[in-house]
Image (cartoon, grey):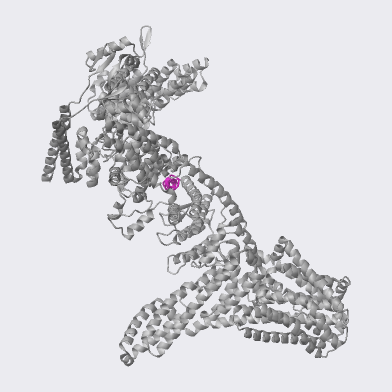
Amino acid sequence: MATIASMLASTQNPFPCFREPLYSRSRSVVFRSYLEPCGRRIRTIPRFIRACQPSDKVGGEGGSVSASAKSYHFGNELLSFASDNFLPLALVTGVGMGFANPTLGCLADKYSLSKFSTCGIFIISGLTLRTEAIGAAVKGWPLGIFGLASILLLTPSFSRLVMLFQLQPQELVTGLGIFCCMPTTLSSGVALTHLAGGNSALALAVTVASNLFGILTIPFWVSRYIAGGVGVSFPTDQLFRSLIVTLLVPLIIGKVIRESFKGFANFVDNNRKLFSRMNAICLSLVPWIQVSRSRSLLLSVEPKVFLAAIGIGILLHLSLLAFNALSIRILSGLSGDYNSKNSKGNGTAVLLVASQKTLPVMVAVVEQLRGAFGEPGLLVLPCVAAHLNQIMIDSILVNVWLRKSNASSSTDGGSDSEDESDIEEEIQEVQNNDINNRYLQDNSDDDDDTDTKRVIKPTKDKRFEEMTHTVEQMKNAMKINDWVSLQENFDKVNKQLEKVMRITEAVKPPTLYIKTLVMLEDFLNEALANKEAKKKMSPSNSKALNAMRQKLKKNNKLHEEEINKYREAPEVEEENEPEDEDDDDEEDEDEEDDDSKEAVTDEEVDETTDTRWETMLNKKDKQMEKLLSKDPKEITWDWVNQKFKEIMAARGRKGTARFDLVDQLTHLTKIAKTPAQKLEILFSVISAQFDVNPGLSGHMPIKVWKKCVLNMLTILDILVKYTNIVVDDTIEPEENETSKPADYDGTIRVWGNLVAFIERIDTEFFKSLQSIDPHTREYVERLRDEPMFLALAQNIQDYFERMGDFKAAAKVALRRVESIYYKPQEVYEAMRKLAELVEEDEEAEDAEEESGPISSFIVVPEVVPRKPTFPESGRAMMDLLVSLIYRNGDERTKARAMLCDIYHHALMDNFGTARDLLLMSHLQDNIQHMDISTQILFNRTMAQLGLCAFRVGMITESHSCLSELYSGQRVRELLAQGVSQSRYHEKTPEQERMERRRQMPYHMHINLELLEAVHLIGAMLLEVPNMAANSLEARRRVISKNFRRLLEISERQAFNAPPENVRDHVMAATRALTKGDFQTAFEVLNSLEVWRMLKNRDSILEMVKARIKEEALRTYLFTYSSSYESLSLEQLAKMFDVTEAQVHSIVSKMMINEELHASWDQPTRCIVFHEVQHSRLQSLAFQLTEKLSVLAESNERAMEARTGGGGLDLSSRRRDNNQDYAGAASGGGRWQDNNMSSGYGGRQGNNRSGYGGRPGQPRDWSGQNRGGGYASRAGSGNRGGGMQMDGSTRMVSLNRGVRT
Amino acid sequence: MEETKENYDLTPRVAPNLDRHLVFPILEFLQERQLYPDEQILKFKIELLNKTNMVDYAMDIHKSLYHTEDAPQDMVERRAEVVARLKSLEEAAAPLVTFLLNPNAVQELRADKQYNLQMLKERYQIGPDQIEALYQYAKFQFECGNYSGAADYLYQYRTLCSNLERSLSALWGKLASEILMQNWDIALEELNRVKEIIDSKSFASPLNQVQNRIWLMHWGLYIFFNHDNGRTQIIDLFIQDKYMNAIQTSAPHLLRYLATAFIVNKRRRPQLKEFIKVIQQEHYSYKDPIVEFLACVFVNYDFDGAQKKMKECEEVIVNDPFLGKRVDDGNFSTVPLKDEFLENARLFIFETYCRIHQRIDMGVLAEKLNLNYEEAERWIVNLIRTSKLDAKIDSESGTVIMEPTQPNVHEQLVNHTKALSGRTYKLVTQLLEHSQGQAAR
């Protein structure tokens, strides 16, 4: 047997089971099991047992071995038959041996081997007895009680009848009589119950109970019926004692051993077969010894008489059966639940158990009698015969039942396969319970599949029933010529058909439906031909007729083929049906074989459900399977190729289950003949896996994603191992390219695109993160998969680099960059550690997997490391990748990599580097022309740059980075961190969907509160002194419009509530700062929550404080300078808690910049303020000049608007007189809104003074004159610190791409 | 201070942008200054020479370094090789060289390059091969240290060469030769020539162009700090957008020289403001006492800090190979640039100081200027007399009193409106042009 098992396991894995995608329950189990690797490990053992189980059943059913199984099961058929009917065979052998050579048997008897054997039997019974089995029996108690009663009380009375027979020698009859008083068999009854699909637990319970009680009742009955008849006194107590010793004690010992040693119990459960074998051998020892002993006597007996005794035995058993069957039926009828499956199982169990009588107890009794009723050998002999008989009869009976139920199901055609599957299920279930009971208790799996079976099956049947019902109605409607209802019903049938098809996963509609169609067509033609009848119809009826005609025509076209087939041979079709079903049955067996192997190999497959479903598969798939479960030796490249093409052809077709496609292809990869072919198929597998989720919005199931990654790794393994294989998607490879063997010399081209795949995998990963709720554990779990992706990407990149395809490598590198760039060093570190950790786990798992009997033709060792390697710091990794991309990437790749690089630099607080990179790359100039996701990346980068500038204390830069981001109210949208509602324009659903697709996953978000705080604080620090300086002409120089607006709003409020959000805080701080109250201002800001987001919070707050002091000082001076004649340095320093040197520096700066009209008086260390008072005329004159320049400016603007694209040549001329135009260009910010190109032009005009004097970007580097640059309105920024980066902050309008 | 000296030494940053031969002067300077151990410098030199053809020189250094009389075998071999190669090159270039040595023949050459080539080919059987050989020969001569020969040949080559790339190379070679020969005037000419070509030529990649510029700026350092007019030239060159960009991206250490030039040169004051901005911006990438001095004076108004920096600057200047050029004046050897720098720096401080002060104590001023009271007074009086400073000295309290400089309202108004007319005029012409253009169309 073990050989069979191993052989089955080693054969090629059968066709993977067709799974139903809708079948969420079992899938969830699968997922769970995947997530809990230990669960899987436990499961492998029982699986293995199950793996050999179905083949036993094949033998048990009388050798109905399927044709395909025959091919390699042939030699084992006999063996399996023998193993299944081991008990009867052993008995017969025992008897035969006894006859043939009595000496051995006599010797055995001398050492009272029979006693030991009896003990052995019960120890084994005890060992194999499960506690829960007894418990399960309790549920069927009414029938159980009847069974007990029947065994213990009713059937013994049959001995009366038996005793009526007169035979010479009388011992034969007496033996049978005693036999009647015995309780039920110990093992065969239970075993047969399994086979018949009865409640085996109940059978066990009844067996145990009756044997126990039997000890009490046997002496009574024997003395009553037999001893009375023969007239011999009966040693009741002695028998009782010996029974207890030989029966109960061993049983209990066995049970105790079982309970106390768990490992032993496991061993027993795993080797149940072996133990039942031992049991049978022990059992057969008894007749052997008995027969040996009484051989001489036996020989004296006339064969005729013996035959008669056997006949009596058979008769006895039959009558017992009849009696029990009758009583059970009556009993069930009384309780009224005969039809339910449970009671049916119970009935079977009781019937079988109650009708059988045990030989071992009988032997024990006879032993105890010590020849009181005559020669023990003669007494036992008929009983041995009777025992054999009853087993034979019952097994035949069981077979007959099974066959009967099969037959009944097949005559019902496709519409009703319930019985068949029902019984099968029961068999299966019983087997599960019996052999795999541990499985049941350890895994919820079994529960699941019984559950699902119960749920799913009725729905399917219901659908069929509904359909049948509707068809019936249609027939009725036809009879009365009611087209209206006919039409309604026709629609209904079509709807039902869909459901049925969906449930059964069938491609072809059921025959019933076709039949109906044909019928309808005929009837329709008839009705149309009959014009008179047509005229007579009611208008609604005739209308329906016409509608029906059209519908039918359309509908029939779809099913034309089937209809024609049906028309050609309606009978044949119908007759074929049952046969097919039979075939299917056989195949089912076959598939179960395969399945079980599959189960061993593929942890994902929930085999029980699969077999369930397979029974309902349509023929086409069956054929496929048949081919796929082909003998491994017959598989050739051509065959696989052909199969592959077939499957690929089905891709995308309606009705093709996507999961199935994946499974089929996965199987093909295992049987692929050449590495190239395997590669080719693997590519298709991955494509198919991508297809699993059709929608753009949803993401790929995570499970599938992981498989996909693994597949990719396998592909890489192959590619690395067989370096002559080249993956290419530009040329169509030759037809038989993949047939070239592994050792082929030249290059083999396989169609495929690794980059596209890796990008898709990344995208799917991204999408999954988008759609998973970030506050769940699932999200975290998902994030943990990132190292897996990184490992893959790294490997692919390495591969490309080795192959010299640096372009592709750059693309892959970009993907890697994009998954790293937003990670600060801490996060990066964490990921690095996680990757190491996870991979260790995974490796352990892999090892586990490897131990399983997976074998494919092309075994690919894991050449490619599964572990991503990370350099110590994220920066190092970024540098590595980014430099590769800069060297080899295309424009977009480079741009994105650059942005990521900048972002990362900013994250690391390298503001200078980040800024230089940004400026040198000209990204701000052409970001408008890039795709939206790059624009978003740009915005994110700008935001991060702003934060970085703030962190390093460069407020002006920070503000100019962020100001444009906040100029509209669409920060969320710009950063793709949520959708902001806009009051003014409604978005179309299309736009909204697009926007949702662009969203950043939560872990990549830039904290908006922090961003807002930074922006507003920056604006405050710049704007407050600015406002103070220009208090008279407030409108003129506005640094942050946004801030001004907010300030206005807050000033309009009658009462100021304590600050709640960021904005309130900053406004409160602003109010304090305007008065020069730096302490309050800082305290308010300090109370902000967002600071905890910052790494070096203290130093940043320190910086903020210093800046606030400085600005407070400046504000104070601006505001109150007119009230002072002089101010001492000391006083100022004390007032603002700043060192004198700082005050001096600040004030000096203000003086130099002519912001403050004052000068130092060195000896007294005072600021002396100069009164600069303009006369009215003078100030009016100033206003006039102001107006004039505005006028000139507007003229210029009008001119530029007219000349349109002339912006560029205008600017070239303008460059000549930069200085003059600086003022004009200060309006550049506004121009930009009106006219982009002229905005550029204007900006370019003064790029020399732009961006804090980094004069002009290296415009000529690229040899062309670009507009823009990082020009700014520095014309207005004549302050010393007027370094503004307006040009660099030109933000992106997201909607531009969508709307226009 | 030992440590900082080395920190301020820019040789490691400058050297990669120089020709091998150009590094020698620097090394010589360093050797003289004793900033590094002699041995180290000698080793450097050998390493440097190994790639050149100046084998004999290398041998000498080797001998002095290891105090032996034997040259290593590989050097001897190399020497033979060099000599052999020189021979072969000489032969190859011989026809052209003889032609060029013949003054009569040379006179036949005209301005027309095409004609010259034609003529050479027809009359002297000198084709492109020979011309190419001339270049190789010149190059070899240069490698051997025969700069004047190289310069001559390269000059001739340029008149005959038709290949732009080669022509540029030749120009570079010429420039290097002139620098090494210390012909500063010619070198400056060559420099401008190279600059023109760099600016006008379209390079394969922008990066290439930047690299060329950086080379040019580095090489130019020799000229700028030796030529009389160099300090203006350096500002004019470096402050150009393109060159400033190159400095910012790749060679921020050049800011030191620019800063020095700005401080020393009074004529380019207007550009100073711009330069200050650059300094502020590059603050994170490059630090240098000289640059920091400017930042102190013009950004932070930290005069005490500026004072300190000035002292550091002195060190830097003395130890800088370009700035610390010595002039032997009898027994003294002075660094003229240093004195000039200090003088001007002092002036810088004072000027700025005065701008924001109304009254300054003479004592403090003297201290700030590193002068004694008397000197300070004299200095200020001088300033007032040359009307560089609008101030008066109050001897009684010992203070300088600045005359308040009220901004003139009229001047302001004029400034505001001056631009308007120009703008309007431009606008009108533009409009006219535009309409004409349209009419013409």
Q: Nearer the viewer, residue A600 or A1122?
A: A1122
**Magenta stretch encompasses residue A808:** yes
The magenta span reads A804-821
Q: Position of residue A357 (x, y in %)?
A: 76, 80
Q: Position of residue A635 (x, y in %)?
A: 56, 64
Q: Give the position of the N terminus of chain A as an image quadrant.
A: bottom right
Q: Is residue A558 above or below residue A1265?
A: below
Q: Is residue B364 above or below residue A245?
A: above
Residue farthest toward the top in the current orientation of the protein: B330
In the rendered structure, the answer to whether residue A1298 lies left or right of residue A758 reads left
Q: Residue at x 79, y 71 (%)?
A: A248
| Callout count | 0
Q: Is residue A322 above or below residue A630?
A: below
In the rendered structure, the answer to whether residue A190 lies left or right of residue B212 reads right
Q: Residue at x 27, y 46 (%)?
A: A1052
Q: Give the position of the C terminus of chain A as an image quadrant.
A: bottom left
Q: Position of residue A621 (x, y in %)?
A: 51, 71
Residue farthest toward the front in the current orientation of the protein: A1055
Q: Is residue A463 visible?
A: yes
Q: Quadrant of residue A36?
A: bottom right
Q: Quadrant of residue A106?
A: bottom right
In the rendered structure, the answer to whether residue A169 lies left or right of residue A1269 reads right
**Magenta stretch encompasses residue A745:** no
Q: Is residue A1284 visible?
A: no
Q: Quadrant of residue A486?
A: bottom left
Dominant SS of magenta comes to: helix
Q: Nearer the viewer, residue B406 or B16?
A: B406
